[in-house]
Amino acid sequence: MDLTPKRYADTVVLATAGRIDHSTSEGFKTALAPHLARCTAGQDRILIDLAGVEYISSVGLRVLMLASKQAKAQGGTIGVAALQPDVKEIFDITRFTMVLNVFPSVREGLAQLSPPALAAFDAT
Amino acid sequence: MPPDAGLRVRFWGTRGSIPVSMTSAEIRRKLIATLVRAAGRALDTPEKAASFLEREVDFAVSHTFGGNSSCVQIVTGSTDYVLCDLGSGARVFGNDVLAARGSGDHTFHVFMSHVHWDHIMGFPFFLPIYTPTNHIRIYGCHAELEDAFRRQHAAPFFPVDFAGLSARIEFVRLEPGREYEVAGLSVKAKLQHHSGDSYGYRFQRAGRVVVYSTDAEHKQDDLAEVQGFVEFFRDADLVIFDSQYSLAEATSIKEDWGHSSNIVGLELCQRAHAKRLCLYHHEPLSDDHKIAALLAETRRLEEITRGDRRVEILAAYDGMEIAL
């Protein structure tokens, strides 16, 4: 599963698309790993842009949970943004909105995660 | 019901971990909500009142999901009784048998998921064990199956020692993955991830399939294990599934606590083409409104993730009966 990175100051926005389920979650996890390694205190923040994702299953959510745990343990920050309505409902029903940083849009996510990243985003 | 008729499933205990009972304050809140709703209505006969409750009052207000711990009956039409687990619901079941068919000359086949306390605590209060002409066969895959039941009856935990029980009680060790014929049912056990292990059971007769899968945590990143459960649930008419936690809880603070979620249950049923998913082993902290909300959310999730087949979603309650 592909992740398209775009840097805004100290934050990397990772865009992905399609379905994150039992057949793609391992690829999602693998693609996320190198970015996650740099998501530490004083290094990169990560915002995953889910605008192109039409479905995420429990195993995909588990990848996000493990990523969040790892980032927290490293002193880093991670969030997800721009969920489609059905995906937002899945996050609500699974209660993942209570355990992950979930933002309505990439811009709002950057505003919360990093003012310099927001400035860079607005300048593009 | 003749033995060749369809199966039915009756729930005697649906609560996880520990039995719960409603407080008088909760009953009062339900009554107030119902009476306010009924204001101005001419509910002057029991029939009118019953119809009003069924049609116009939410289940979470007019009923309760109940509080006994795990006990489910597979009604086969045979004179023998078939049960899954002996939680506190077994006490109510035993009383019902006595009232309907007298105290003796019964045979019970009980399939044990595991021997944690909430799954065996109904046994000392299961009155058929005190009648000499009853025959109770307890099936399970755990080596310590018999010992657990004997220890529960030993001093200082209970005043009647196991040796003093007058019914004929046998313990039958099963092998997971092997198919057995019991009381006209074909039954197969499957190992599940839970502290000390638990086992699910797949019951089958004349093309009808019921799966009882409680106290099971599903590690979703173990694809082989997931596929094993998809096959175990394959084409089931009913899957009774441990949905004690939310997915977020089950993958974070309550990981390795041995329980699953409504979400994982739905995904497994969708992949297995199961017809019905019954949410079971309800969290003791959840009141009726919370369980009703869980049911509504799971139905909504099924709707937005449905492929070419629908999975009917139910939430078990004490006294619920499902015909297959």
Image (spheres, helix red, strand yellow):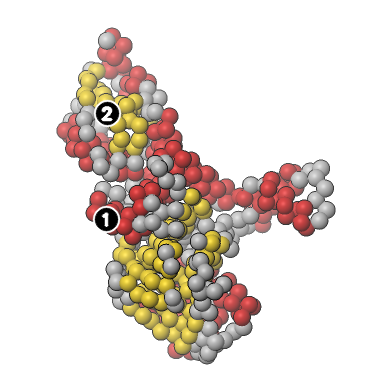
Residue A17: image x %, image y %? 28, 29
Subunit of mark 2? A
Residue B140: image x %, image y %? 36, 74
Q: Which residue is at a point 34% across and 41% down the rendered structure image?
A: A57
Badge 1: few (under 14), some or many (20 or more) residues near its Cα, within 10 Å? some
Residue B249 appears in the picture as rendered: no
On screen, residue B13 versus residue B234, left or right, reads right
Determine the image quadrant of residue A90.
top left
On screen, residue A49 versus residue B203, left or right, reads left
Q: Which residue is at a point 30% across and 65% down the rendered structure image?
A: B191
**Residue tagged 1:** B225
Amino acid at dot 2: Thr
The kind of secondary structure element at disc 2 is strand
Amino acid at dot 1: Glu
Viewer-side residue, B201 vs B294: B201
Vertical relation: B174 (above or below) B63: below
**Residue tagged 2:** A16
Viewer-side residue, B190 vs B309: B309
The mark total stands at 2
Viewer-side residue, B135 vs B205: B205
Residue B55: image x %, image y %? 68, 48
Vertical relation: B100 (above or below) B239: below
